Image (spheres, rainbow, N blue to C red):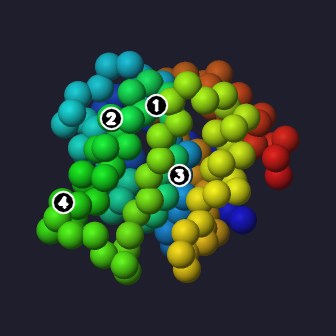
Amino acid sequence: MNLAYKQIAKPYEFSSPFTKGECAVLFYIADTDTSPQQQADVSDALLAQGCRYAVCAGYDCEKWHDAIDSAYLKRNDGKPSDTNFVMTTWHENENLEDIVFFFLNNTQFEEWSPQNFLVLVLGNHPMILANIRKEIEKNI
């Protein structure tokens, strides 16, 4: 298992820490002020750089889940594809322990199983990242 942690703040330019391979992403939205265009841009960047499973949590996580789904469909001319399918879930009002457990144990599907795991916090909130890291360390 390759595990990386990343935090991005405005203007939300995402680059994957993994040079090769697809990944599962625990995407925690800590910034309460994002536009639909920013959601679309970050979602597209996530997919372009290998995100195959996005576990969305935090502020407006359902909207971010939908933005990732929309970016996926846009990249595939509106049609799901078996070769690059992207799963998304949102975890509104769930405790961090349950979100982390899900991320580490339930982000495989069909014949795809992640080797790379990325925790991505959107917004400049180091305590959120520290709390996620602490919870992950309890689980691995």
Q: Which mark is residue 29?
A: 1
Does residue 38 appear anywhere in the picture? yes
Whole-Å distance between the Cαs marked 1 and 3? 12 Å
**Amino acid type for the residue under numbered disc 1:** Ile
| Above or below: residue 131 compared with residue 85 | above
Q: Quadrant of residue 138?
A: top right
Question: Pointer 4 and pointer 2: residues touching (CB < 8 Å)?
Answer: no
Question: Pointer 2 and pointer 1: residues touching (CB < 8 Å)?
Answer: no
Residue located 38% across and 70% down the image: 85
| Above or below: residue 87 compared with residue 82 | above
- Asked which secondary structure carries label 1, the reply is strand
- Of pointers 4 and 2, the one earlier in the residue sequence: 2
- Asked which secondary structure carries label 2, the reply is helix
**Amino acid type for the residue under numbered disc 2:** Lys
Of residues 87 and 46, the one drawn nearer to the viewer in this rendering: 87
Q: Is residue 2 left or right of residue 124?
A: right
**Amino acid type for the residue under numbered disc 4:** Lys
Residue ID for mark 2: 63
Q: Is residue 19 left or right of residue 68?
A: right
Determine the residue located farthest toward the top in the rendered image.
32
Which mark is nearer the camera, 2 or 1?
Answer: 2
Residue ID for mark 3: 25
- Of pointers 3 and 2, the one earlier in the residue sequence: 3
Residue located 17% across and 64% down the image: 78
- Asked which secondary structure carries label 4, the reply is helix
